Amino acid sequence: MKTEYVKSYPDSPDEAGLARASEIIRSGGLVAFPTETVYGLGGSALNPGSAKKIYAAKGRPSDNPLIIHLYDAREAEEYAYTNEIYYKITDRFSPGPITVILPKKDCVPDEVTGGLDTVAVRIPSHPTARRFLQLCGVAVAAPSANISGSPSPTCAEHVRADLDGRIDMIIDGGTCDIGLESTIVKITSDGVVILRPGAVTEEMLASVAPVGRDKTLLSKPSEDLRPEAPGMKYRHYAPVADVFLVRGGHDDVIAYMKARLCEDESSGIVCTEADRDEISGKNVKYLPNDTEGQARELFEILRGFNETDAKRIYCVTPSRVGIGFALYNRLIKASGFRSVGATVPIPVIGLTGQSGAGKSTAATAFSDAGAYVADCDETYRSLLYKNSPLIKEIKKAFPTVIKRGLLDRAALSAVVFADKDKLALLNSITHEAILKDVRRQLKQAYADGYKLAAVDASQLFEAAFDRECTAVIGVCADEKTRIERIMKRDGISEERARARLSSQHNEDFFRVYCDRTLENNGSPEELYEKAKRIAEEYLKGEAQ
Ligand code: TXA
Ligand code: MG
């Protein structure tokens, strides 16, 4: 089959080309088209034959359902049973990078939904996609326009590399703005559950409905843990070479990558622009420094390795907050959940959560199980001795809060709590100093023969220490329970306990970003036993 090429950029649309494209869709053919996320491979959503052709062209298992693309949210009525939450979500985020799963109507063939009784609906915002969908006049079923398993295409050239000669037409609409596939949500009785993270983040969705997360977003699917988006069970987003995520402090990660380059100069390396002066080589590639840019360029960079002789690719680990979560999710899938520790080659478990949730009980359990435990609060205090390097750093930024070589905590609180920027500056100074010392402790613990380490850090995500952890465990408890515990523990009033909690993330934050949570609404003994069992799993190498 000869594939026709049409160039239709938002600022120079090819009306006639898009009209031909819509004609191909209506007559049962396949057209690849740009969207703001990634390119899609479209066919009529009402034609079972088109769906079969899509699976054949992509080499995709036919139990993996397709998303149907619409020009307008209201058109979903024709194909699915909508509800209030669907309209709340689409009013807010559509057209845009979000897909909603709805119960399907009979007109949508089983071939499109992989036999499911639900259908995924999305209204893209890319102007070329919108004009194309408008001209089609029928929903367009489209998966990403790549060969199954390879990184999704973010420009027409990627589509050509995978599908030239296998489909009727490719519409070139330029490079995709977002670069990662849409967020997929399922509507439940009390809110939404995220089945695939994307540019519409948890925080954004939370303003519309309570958000939950599918357990398989960050963990390896297993027999008893099946992803609800069937596609998520397949290895995804991966170039031909093996990908390894490198965890650890920045300097340790760069040193680790350099060591791999020394062993084999063809090693693939993915680091950031900021590292350009420190590391270079024929297969070293640089992601932009900002997370949005990293999302946009990740697939392009991963694909680029297919033109090199790299057999192994070592990639920096992004922090998982905001759109970083979607980036991290794609990377752990591209790597097949393989990660390596650059600071220490033993598992490092982050323990985090709010005050009163029970983090220290969990830390004690880890310690009793035989893990080395680094406590960030304690580390901070130990770094504040008279005229210490950290004291000097703080003094440079806040001259008035250091008195006779020591920190005046009350004075510091008064300065930073009234001013967000000053607090951010203080945090960047203290986080860096604490993490540097924690890394030193981890290296010492490893030298001393420890097989497992845990880091107790209430500000773990703020300090981006999630990038250095094998897994992050969030200790969570209901607000009422936490307030009672803080009042009792610190002998303070309910009002003060509430004030303290109001400056922290709510428990949903931890439920979203942690790899697993330990719910602690019962007795300390119960929490202790649960935490100890988890520590033992890691020690035996059973947990990931
Ligand atoms: O941004 C995007 O969503 C892109 C562009 C082209 O719109 N499309 C895309 O499609 O990424 P695809 O097929 O590569 O990924 C669709 C995912 C798969 O993991 C599939 O299993 C899931 O959506 N999915 C589709 N229908 C579903 C359903 N009824 N229930 C649960 N998951 C579903
Ligand atoms: Mg795909």
Image: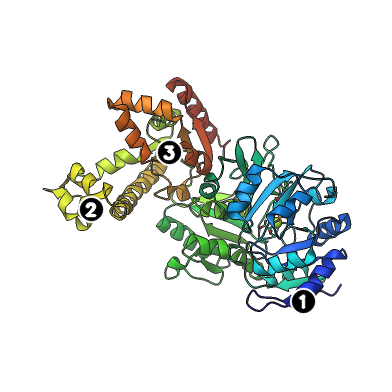
First of labels 1, 2 by sequence position: 1
Inter-mark Cα distance, 3 to 1: 54 Å
> Is the residue under label 2 in contact with that under label 1 (CB below 8 Å)?
no
Kind of residue sitting beneath label 3: Thr
Q: State which quadrant residue 138 falls in.
A: bottom right
Crowdedness of circle 3 by 10 Å Cα count: few (<14), some, many (20+)?
A: many
Residue behind mark 3: 352
Quarter assignment of residue 123: bottom right
Disc number lying in front (3 or 1) = 1
The amino acid beneath tag 1 is: Gly
Mark 2, Cα crowd under 10 Å, few <14 / some 14-19 / many 20+, is many
Which comes sooner in the sequence, label 3 or label 1? 1
Labelled disc at residue 17? 1
Tag shown at residue 394:
2
Q: Nearer the viewer, residue 449 or 136?
A: 136
Quadrant the N terminus occupies: bottom right
Using the image, determine if residue 220 lies above or below residue 168: above
Residue extending farthest to the left is 404
Residue 167 visible in the shown view: no
Q: Nearer the viewer, residue 266 or 149?
A: 149
Residue 331 image point, x, y percent: 58, 54
Q: How is the image coloured?
A: rainbow
- Which class describes the residues within 10 Å of circle 1: few (<14), some (14-19), or many (20+)? some
Q: Give SS at disc 2.
A: helix
